Image (spheres, rainbow, N blue to C red):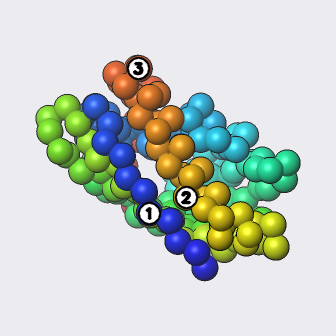
Amino acid sequence: MSQVEESIEVRVPVHTAYNQWTQFETFPEFMDGVERIEQRTDTLTHWVTKVGGQEREFDAEITEQIPDERVAWTTVNGEARQAGVVTFHRTRDDTTKVMLQMDFDPGGVAETVGDKLGFVKRQVSGDLQRFKRFMEARGSETGSWRGEV
């Protein structure tokens, strides 16, 4: 298993950043390589990704969700193996530190080499940068799910 940890400060309140993160179907707007996400139940999502010309499909289950604090997940089915958590920390009334930690299993030689060259870390960092631009340009969330898991 490999691991990546990245964080970024976003100029929106904690509840705004958290609420947006619960809108999984909007992830393709700021996550590079994510083609589509379908929210199947409150805790199950189906992902279609395309990275380096390789399309993958998998299901991810939300294992923990605490409003304004954290969302944790693990893959449960499909062509990717990963688990992670994103946490939200108030740094000021209008600023949130978003921290993402993810464990993943690179599948195959190409992904292992890409991981060793820092591809996944750069992709996660870029995704967080795009999330920041997405949120700061909007100033508000597109929706929310405030349930606990």
Assess disc 2: are there few (<14), some (14-19) or many (≥20) residues with their C-alpha within 10 Å of its C-alpha: some
When the figure is inspected, residue 112 is found, relative to residue 127, above or below; the finding is below
In the image, taking residue 15 as reference, residue 51 lies left or right, namely right
Q: Residue furthest top?
A: 138
Give how far across and how far down residue 121 sits, in percent.
55, 58
The answer, for residue 75, to whether it is visible in the render is no
Q: Residues within 10 Å of mark 1 (few under 14, many from 20)?
A: some
Q: Earlier in the sequence, mark 1 or mark 2?
A: 1
Instruction: Name the kind of residue labelled 2 in the image.
Output: Lys
The x and y percentages for residue 141 are: 39, 28
| Neighbour tally class for label 3: few under 14, some 14-19, many 20 plus, Cα within 10 Å | few
- Comparing 143 with 147, the one in front is 143
| Label 1 to label 3: alpha-carbon separation | 26 Å
Say which label, 3 or 2, has the lower sequence index.
2
Which residue is located at x 81 percent, y 66 percent? 110
Which residue, given by chain and number where applicable, does mark 2 sit on? 121
Decide if residue 142 is on the left or right side of residue 70: right
Reading the image, the residue beneath label 3 is 138
- Kind of element beneath mark 3: helix
Task: Identify residue for label 1.
Answer: 5
* Residue 118 coordinates in the image, percent (x, y): 60, 62
Give the vertical position of 75 relative to 49 (above or below): below
Comes first in the chain, label 1 or label 3: 1
- Label 3 near label 1: C-beta < 8 Å? no
Contact (CB < 8 A) between labels 3 and 2?
no
Secondary structure at badge 2 equals helix
Q: Is residue 44 above or below residue 103?
A: above
Residue type, label 3? Arg
